[in-house]
Image (cartoon, rainbow, N blue to C red):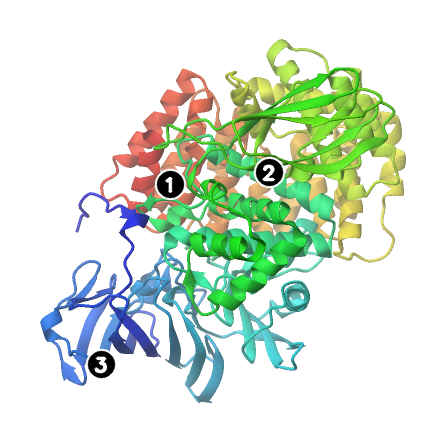
């Protein structure tokens, strides 16, 4: 059946559900093609919604076997999206509704609801997957305690909460904490446990387990250690304790997203659980630590306090991302973490905010909520929390959070509730700050300086460009952290937070002996684009002298972009300032190697395209690619005398350890290897590949060889060594896709899709090939449109099976407006072709439609 015009959901339409769900009891009889789900809901009228109402339950793809109220059978027929029981058929007071349905998890390729992965049953219910399991009010403001019985011949049967009874072929779980249906989870399979224990500070003993497929038991230590560190950190920093006797994590190979915070039973994409030195890189270890923390932290920010409706998604995601960022900073390095987060924010969120998919951190409408699990909701959402904390101070923030937990525990809350807590705890008026949640687009802050021989004046101006549906923008409050340096490099004014609330404001600094050099937006104190004309020499000075580590890096980055932009537009040669400044940083042994590695990294091609577009130019992907290559080669020549010595000196003695210090040394060493490869064509990298005893070094050397165009032997050897390992083979695919030379990239990637191991129904594998290719800037944007065609073909193929992942990957096309008319035309034609596919999913229809608008 073909849907009518897609239904738009509006925040302003919110109404509470007319019933309260006092208790839920579910029984699952699992079978691949005919699973039976029996549900008993204890319902009572909701005083917040008086009057007589039809009872409407969500349900999709369910075969109704029976329905009864108070034990009396009902004669009802579901429609395509649910089941309605007319008001006349309902008792006046509380009553019990029973249903039984049949579903087929084996045929569920969308990986939403109850599905199967390698013979194991698992669930993904956020945002609206529970309606594919049973008839239910599938909305986050309906919270209830769940009791679940699972019947299956499989040995391990898991659900939320505590295990209360079990026997051969069945288990019963009870979750006493009222929760929305999106946090429901069930797992059944032949699984092995890696066990651990945690005692909370009030003495509760919690049994921990990481569940994996047989054979993967040896790759769970890091996930378990990360979980224990997260539990301790949330107690120490936020005063939050775990609240059940059991905490389970399950690794699943087929998963649409990263992981899911189901109450007491987190389900993870296996790539964010499994790690060993031989199979996982330093980045994998860091990501696992961060995502384990993220999902664990949701237990309070998301589960105990959840969202009233999906428009409030940033309430739990922005806050939980902010918390996991703080955690990683505490575990590793705050400066390095901040730089990495800002790189990601600019690459994904600024990009999103600048194109047709721009939307507020709290959107006002959507068609398919799965399309709003975005960098804007997550990463910009986290930036808003960081700004709040900067504005009210660490103590104000701590008080506000205490009040938030005390006031809203057990509730489904809104952004208004969240801001009110800050107002009540700190006495600040946050009405203007509210705009950050409702206004899309990245503000641009322009800086002008004035010096009259004694007084230094900074004039800041803000403007936010129009975004789809929001032509007119208003000023937002922007905390701009500023410090002033003397020409000799000493800091004369330490970090001060200027609050820019109007369209234009001036800030005066008196009593200075010399004209200072300003360091602006320290620590990236607000998610804005800073427009400030500065000379190469000034940026090099800040890279050498700024006391703010973030802004040191930022100065180097801006300098590199300035140099690269001139190379792209007028074929200029890189000036001496940048080369000398990078050399100084590289050789400064007082600096963290991880920081030095970041300073060596050249701006990415997509980043340059965005930067040129923001400056009013039309980026040419081939010229950017060529200029970036010249810039790297020039840097390598300049640094050549130092490289072999550094490469030797950075070698780590002893066996691999995944800690931040060792990872930083490896990152710098691999950056040095990449520079050497630009000189020797890969001789050293081939030796490094052969000598590698961990995945970081192995893929690092392999990447050098691919870029040097001489990786054939190593790629073949890698496939022989790792052909049996899905996660490692994802790296083999994605490195080739991402690094293929632009001229032949589309053909090379087409070849990869013909490889017998290209299991395109597995989201990780699809992302490793098609997703990585859309990040190969010059390859994807090839002038003849072959890159666009290839990606569109695969999205069209995936959409009917897995609309969520297909729609998410369609964001590859969201940058069309940056480019020339030919490329814009080609992208538009591919989007139109996608949109014309009969039976296209609601997910993809919304995305392609927004990008074509
Ligand atoms: N709540 C999960 C997380 O961030 C993400 C789940 C998203 N799932 C989805 N189908 N959109 O931690
Ligand atoms: Zn989350």
Where's residue 152, x and y in %?
A: 39, 80
Q: Position of residue 347 (x, y in %)?
A: 56, 35
Q: Secondary structure at mark 3?
A: strand
As drawn, the label of residue 795 is 1
Quadrant in the picture for residue 88: bottom left
Residue in front for this viewpoint, 830 or 83: 83
Sequence-first disc among 2 and 1: 2
Local packing at callout 2 (Cα closer than 10 Å; few below 14, some 14-19, many 20+) is: many
Relative placement, left or right, of 307 versus 27 is: right
Residue at the disc numbered 2? 526
- Name which residue lies at 81% across and 43% down: 592
For the C terminus, the image quarter is: top left
Callouts 1 and 3 close, C-beta under 8 Å: no
Label 2 vs label 3: CA separation? 51 Å
Please, what secondary structure does the residue beneath circle 2 have? Answer: loop
- Left or right of residue 748: residue 309: left
In-image side of 799 versus 608 (left or right)? left
Element under label 1?
helix
Residue 550 position within the rendered picture, expressed as x and y whole percent measured from the top left: 72, 38
Q: Nearer the viewer, mark 1 or mark 3?
A: 3
């Amino acid at each position: 059946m073909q849907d009518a015009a897609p239904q738009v959901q509006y925040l302003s339409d919110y109404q509470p559900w007319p019933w309260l769900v006092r208790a839920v009891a579910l029984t699952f009889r699992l079978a691949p093609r005919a699973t039976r789900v029996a549900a008993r809901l204890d319902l009572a009228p909701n005083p917040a919604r008086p009057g007589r109402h039809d009872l409407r339950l969500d349900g999709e793809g369910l075969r109704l076997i029976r329905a009864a109220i108070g034990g009396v059978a009902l004669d009802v027929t579901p429609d395509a999206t649910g089941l309605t029981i007319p008001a006349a058929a309902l008792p006046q007071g509380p009553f019990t509704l029973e249903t039984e349905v049949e579903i087929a998890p084996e045929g569920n390729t969308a990986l939403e609801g109850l599905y199967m992965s390698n013979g194991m049953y698992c669930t993904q219910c956020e945002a609206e997957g529970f309606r594919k399991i049973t008839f239910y009010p599938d909305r986050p403001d309906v919270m209830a305690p769940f009791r679940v019985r699972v019947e299956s011949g499989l040995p391990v049967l898991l659900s939320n909460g505590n295990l209360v009874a079990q026997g051969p072929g069945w288990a019963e779980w009870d979750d006493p904490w009222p929760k929305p249906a999106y946090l429901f989870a069930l797992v059944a399979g032949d699984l092995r446990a890696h066990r651990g224990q945690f005692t909370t500070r009030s003495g509760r003993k919690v049994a921990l387990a990481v569940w994996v497929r047989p054979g993967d038991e040896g790759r769970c230590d890091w996930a378990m250690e990360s979980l224990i560190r997260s539990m301790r950190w949330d107690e120490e920093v936020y005063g939050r304790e775990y609240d059940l006797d059991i905490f389970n994590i399950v690794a699943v190979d087929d998963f649409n997203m990263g992981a899911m915070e189901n109450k007491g039973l987190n389900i993870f994409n296996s790539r964010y659980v499994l790690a060993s030195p031989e199979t996982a890189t330093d980045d994998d270890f860091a990501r696992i630590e961060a995502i384990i923390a993220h999902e664990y932290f949701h237990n309070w920010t998301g589960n105990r306090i959840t969202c009233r409706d999906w428009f409030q998604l940033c309430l739990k995601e922005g806050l939980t991302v902010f918390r996991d960022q703080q955690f990683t900073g505490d575990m590793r390095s705050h400066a390095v973490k901040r730089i990495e987060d800002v790189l990601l924010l600019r690459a994904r969120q600024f990009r999103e905010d600048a194109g047709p998919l721009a939307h507020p951190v709290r959107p006002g409408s959507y068609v398919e909520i799965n399309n709003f699990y975005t960098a804007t909701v997550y990463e910009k959402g986290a930036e808003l929390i960081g700004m709040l904390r900067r504005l009210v101070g660490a103590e104000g923030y701590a008080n506000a959070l205490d009040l938030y937990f005390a006031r809203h525990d057990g509730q489904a809350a809104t952004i208004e509730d969240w801001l009110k807590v800050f107002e009540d705890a700190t006495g600040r008026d946050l009405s203007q700050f509210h705009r950050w949640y409702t206004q899309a687009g990245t503000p641009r802050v322009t800086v002008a300086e004035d010096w009259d021989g004694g007084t230094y004046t900074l004039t800041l101006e803000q403007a936010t460009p129009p975004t789809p549906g929001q032509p007119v923008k208003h000023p937002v409050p922007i905390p701009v952290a500023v410090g002033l340096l003397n020409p000799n490099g000493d800091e004369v004014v330490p970090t001060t937070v200027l609050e820019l609330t109007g369209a234009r404001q001036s800030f005066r600094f008196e009593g200075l002996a010399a004209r200072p050099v300003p360091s602006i937006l320290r620590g990236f104190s607000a998610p804005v684009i800073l427009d400030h004309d500065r000379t190469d020499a000034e940026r090099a000075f800040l890279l050498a002298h700024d006391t703010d580590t973030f802004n040191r890096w930022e100065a180097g980055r801006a300098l590199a972009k300035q140099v690269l932009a001139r190379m792209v537009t007028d074929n200029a040669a890189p000036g001496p300032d940048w080369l000398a400044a990078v050399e100084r940083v590289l050789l400064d042994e007082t600096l963290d190697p991880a920081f030095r590695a970041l300073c060596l990294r050249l701006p990415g091609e997509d980043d340059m395209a965005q930067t040129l577009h923001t400056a009013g130019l039309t980026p040419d992907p081939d010229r950017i690619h060529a200029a970036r290559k010249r810039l790297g080669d020039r840097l390598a020549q300049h640094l050549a005398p130092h490289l072999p010595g550094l490469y030797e000196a950075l070698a780590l003695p002893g066996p691999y350890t995944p800690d931040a210090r060792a990872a930083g040394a490896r990152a710098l060493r691999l950056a040095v290897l990449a520079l050497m490869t630009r000189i020797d064509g890969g001789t050293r990298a081939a030796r490094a590949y052969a000598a590698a005893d961990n995945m970081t070094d192995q893929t690092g050397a392999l990447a050098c060889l691919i870029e040097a165009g001489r990786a054939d032997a190593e790629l073949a050897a890698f496939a022989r060594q790792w052909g049996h390992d899905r996660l490692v083979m994802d790296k083999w695919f994605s490195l080739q896709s991402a690094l293929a030379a632009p001229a032949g990239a589309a053909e090379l990637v087409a070849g990869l899709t013909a490889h017998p191991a290209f299991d395109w129904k597995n989201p990780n594998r699809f992302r490793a090939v098609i997703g990585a290719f859309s990040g190969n800037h010059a390859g994807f944007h090839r002038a003849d449109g072959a890159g666009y065609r290839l990606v569109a073909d695969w999205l069209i193929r995936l959409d009917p099976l897995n609309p969520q992942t297909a729609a998410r990957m369609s964001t590859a096309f969201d940058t069309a407006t940056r480019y020339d008319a030919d490329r814009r035309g080609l992208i538009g034609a591919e989007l139109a072709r996608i949109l014309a596919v009969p039976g296209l999913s609601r997910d993809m229809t919304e995305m392609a439609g927004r990008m074509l608008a």
